[in-house]
Amino acid sequence: QYLAKKKHGEYEREKNRYHTENFLYDKRADIYLCPEGKALKPYKGRHSNQGVRKRRQIIYQGVACDGCKVRQLCTSQRFRTLAREERRELVERMRARLLSKEGKEKYKKRLHTVESPFGHIKHNLGYRSFLLRGLKKVGGEFTLMCIGYNLKKIQSFLIRRREVNQKGIGHDKSVIAICNISCISFLIRVLKRFIFDFLYLNTSIAQKHATDITL
């Protein structure tokens, strides 16, 4: 979404003049400069462990908003504030890579290679977060997701091939395709059962461990 808006110059339009993206960050002084050249200084920290994503933010607040003539265009509050993630520098570094010439070429390849699987896994299958913790366990969980996705792709391919074969290419090939589809369907059912048992087992162990610690 950010790259699309950046590409079409969304942040450069007058109506978005006071968008967060148009505030410049001065790393040496640790302040933000608004489009009018006025400073926003660190005001407080905001940390939260709730939800899937942990927040580690620093809130910056304007120091000269009271007498600003365009304050109503910038904020409805007395002072303009901005929230900066502690890992914001990493995000900005990645954006710079994506906006480079080499990054744009690589991103084009990503659109038709990995975006579709990720979109299907996240949106259609509902895997928006990992249930396990630790690189090894998360790697195993994601591998199971990919195996399921690949088996489903193979099944779809075999179904299409069977439909072609049934139009007159040969009875034997159709029989083979049907057998392959049956095998793949069975593997998918086994995989789903395995994923459920695997995740349920790890979750149960984690909950029992947490209960033991509490007791």
Image (cartoon, rainbow, N blue to C red):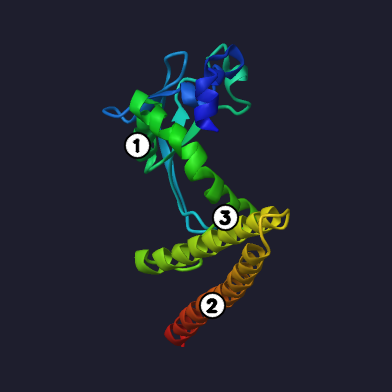
95 w.r.t. 155: above or below:
above
* Residue 50 screen position, x and y as percent: 53, 59
Disc 3 from disc 1: Cα separation? 29 Å
Residue at position x 61%, y 61% in the image: 155
Residue that protrudes farthest toward the left in the picture: 28
Q: Work out whether 143 lies above or below 122.
A: below
| Tag 2 secondary structure | helix
Mark 1 to mark 2: distance in Å?
40 Å
Q: Secondary structure at mark 3?
A: helix
Q: Please, what is the three-letter code of the amino acid marked with disc 1?
A: Glu
Along the viewing direction, whichever of 68 and 50 lies nearer the viewer: 50
Q: In which quadrant will I find the N terminus? A: top right
Circle 2 Cα neighbour tier, 10 Å, few/some/many (<14 / 14–19 / ≥20): few
The residue that appears at 36% across and 25% down in the rendered structure is 100
Name which of mark 2 and mark 3 comes first in the sequence: 3
**Residue 90 picture quarter:** top left
Q: Nearer the viewer, residue 1 or 57?
A: 1
In the rendered view, tell whether residue 191 sits above or below residue 22: below
In percent of the image, x 62 and y 51: which residue is there?
123
Q: Which mark is residue 89?
A: 1
